[in-house]
Image (cartoon, helix red, strand yellow):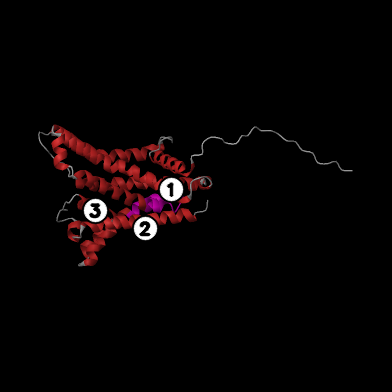
């Protein structure tokens, strides 16, 4: 007669979690903060910090040069106008998103940890939007903060900060609006590209190619094609869109030899184009994360 199979029961001491359950909003905020830290390499090896922080420092160079000149000048002296600031750092912004966006979007795909995120309170759209918001926030540190530094420094250099603010206060909302739209645009394009593949090198090359080639094509269309076809062709250029909306917000006029002046479009078209491109990129980002295998 066969003996009944035996077994043992062990009390491993596991206990149910009885603390507060913070839920989905807290998970989204945690994802946003973690993503923002990751962009600047906080909590990661030194090699992860070098690129983002060097490019961040480069974005502040024009403002620091302006402040240095203003500090030794006896009067108001603008090395560069506020509406020109983003033109000077466009390449820096493009390199920044080309460096950080592929890591932000691709690392979880490479490590195959998306299933861990999606099994918790956070849903796929939350994950994508939190990371996108973190990238936009990081870029505001490279766009809006230097403009604010420049604005305050110019007022202090004149020994009349109150008078300077009273005369130039309209530059602040223009700087904020243009910075936000530029950040939304650059972050949207770079994140939409990076989300498509876990290969960081492919994403970086694709982002730089889109930024540079689109600008070359847009300027070429303006220079070589007569009529509306050439004029509206400038909207192909990412950099020209950024320049156009900035001039519009600051109510400034580009130099006559510049492609923007030759296109001679209403400035609001550049802002509307930036919004449209951003919305398309967001749709692509959400679609990608809704269908990605986790």
Q: Which residue appears at 43% of the width and 49% of the height?
A: 128
- What residue span does the magenta drawing correspond to? 190-210
The residue labelled by disc 2 is: 280
**Which numbered mark, 1 or 3, is in the foreground of this view?**
3
Label 3 or label 2, whichever comes before in sequence order: 3
Extreme-right residue of the structure: 1
* x and y, in percent, of residue 134 in the image: 38, 44
The residue labelled by disc 1 is: 105
Residue 208 among magenta residues = yes
The kind of secondary structure the magenta stretch mainly shows is helix
Label 1 or label 3, whichever comes before in sequence order: 1
Whether the residues at callouts 3 and 2 have beta carbons within 8 Å, the answer is no
Q: Quadrant of residue 158?
A: top left
**Which numbered mark, 2 or 1, is in the foreground of this view?**
2
Q: Separation of disc 3 and disc 2 at Cα?
A: 18 Å
The residue labelled by disc 3 is: 245
Q: Which residue appears at 21% of the width and 51% of the height?
A: 249
Name the secondary structure under disc 2: helix
- Front residue (pair 231, 275): 275
Is residue 241 among the parts visible in the rendering? yes
* x and y, in percent, of residue 293 in the image: 52, 53
Q: Separation of disc 2 and disc 1 at Cα?
A: 18 Å
Name the secondary structure under disc 1: helix
* x and y, in percent, of residue 6 in the image: 79, 39
């Amino acid at each position: 007669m066969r003996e009944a199979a035996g077994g043992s029961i062990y009390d491993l001491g596991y206990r149910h979690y009885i603390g507060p359950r913070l839920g989905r909003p807290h998970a989204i905020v945690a994802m946003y903060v973690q993503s923002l830290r990751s962009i600047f390499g906080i909590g990661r090896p030194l090699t992860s910090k070098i690129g983002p922080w060097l490019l961040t420092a480069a974005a502040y160079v024009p403002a620091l040069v302006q402040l240095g000149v203003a500090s030794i000048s006896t009067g108001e002296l603008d090395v560069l106008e506020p509406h020109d600031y983003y033109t000077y750092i466009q390449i820096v912004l493009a390199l920044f998103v080309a460096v950080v966006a592929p890591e932000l979007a691709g690392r979880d795909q490479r490590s195959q940890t998306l299933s861990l995120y999606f099994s918790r309170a956070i849903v796929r759209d939350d994950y994508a939007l939190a990371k996108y918001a973190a990238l936009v926030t990081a870029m505001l540190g490279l766009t809006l903060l230097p403009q604010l530094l420049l604005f305050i420094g110019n007022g202090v250099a004149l020994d009349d900060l109150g008078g300077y603010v009273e005369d130039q206060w309209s530059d602040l909302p223009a700087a904020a609006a243009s910075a936000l739209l530029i950040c939304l645009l650059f972050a949207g394009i770079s994140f939409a590209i990076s989300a498509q593949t876990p290969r960081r090198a492919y994403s970086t090359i694709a982002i730089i190619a889109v930024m540079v080639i689109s600008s070359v094509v847009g300027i070429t269309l303006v220079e070589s094609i007569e009529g509306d076809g050439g004029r509206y062709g400038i909207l192909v250029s990412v950099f020209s869109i950024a320049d156009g909306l900035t001039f519009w917000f600051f109510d400034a006029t580009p130099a006559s030899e510049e492609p923007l002046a030759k296109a001679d479009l209403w400035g609001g078209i550049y802002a509307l184009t930036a919004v449209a491109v951003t919305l398309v990129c967001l749709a692509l980002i959400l679609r990608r994360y809704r269908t990605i295998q986790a």
